[in-house]
Image (cartoon, rainbow, N blue to C red):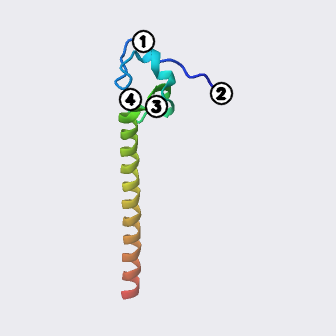
Amino acid sequence: MAQVPRADAGLICPLHKKDVSKVCHTCPWWVQLKGASPNTGEMIDDWRCSVAYLPILMVEVAQKANQAGAATEDMRNEITRRMDLQTRRLLG
């Protein structure tokens, strides 16, 4: 199992009220995130508090929802186009 790194000293954890370098590596919310940043596209391989990752993850979810909505609209438009074409053929 990989060793969990400690946070950089200097910030105070709002939950534990202690320096992050003393508590984060023991907290279950201290997680590693790997993947592409939805803001910049650069690769992320970083340990951070889950609460700190929330804005990044919310942007990612919003982007995926927009992409799904666009794909659904494209499919609806294609189905409508084909149904109109078929109706014209049947009506002569």
**Which amino acid type is marked by label 3?**
Trp
Q: In front: 23, or 91? A: 23
Residue assigned mark 2: 1
Q: Are marks 2 and 1 in contact (CB under 8 Å)?
A: no
Q: In the rendered view, tell whether residue 28 sits above or below residue 78.
A: above
Image quarter of the N terminus: top right
Kindly indicate the quadrant of the structure image that contains residue 61. top left
Mark linked to residue 9: 1
Q: Residues within 10 Å of mark 1 (few under 14, many from 20)?
A: few
The residue singled out by tag 3 in the image is: 29
Instruction: Say whether residue 1 is left or right of residue 79.
Output: right
Task: Name the outermost residue toward the right.
Answer: 1
Q: Earlier in the sequence, mark 2 or mark 1?
A: 2
- Comparing 67 with 32, the one in front is 32
The numbered mark, 1 or 4, whose residue comes first in the sequence reads 1
Q: Is residue 81 above or below residue 69?
A: below
In-front residue for pair 53/27 = 27
Residue 73 is situated, as x and y percent measured from the top left of the image, at 36, 60
Residue type at the position of mark 4: Ala
Q: Is residue 86 left or right of residue 6?
A: left
Residue shown at 38% from the left, 35% from the top: 54
Q: Earlier in the sequence, mark 2 or mark 3?
A: 2
Q: Provide residue 80's location: percent of width, then percent of height.
A: 37, 71
Residue type, mark 1 in image:
Ala
Counting from the top left corner in percent of width and height, residue 44 is at 49, 28
The Cα–Cα distance between marks 3 and 1, rounded to whole angstroms, is 17 Å
Q: Are marks 3 and 4 in contact (CB under 8 Å)?
A: no
Q: Which residue, given by chain and number where applicable, does mark 4 sit on?
A: 52
Q: Residue at x 48, y 27 (%)?
A: 27
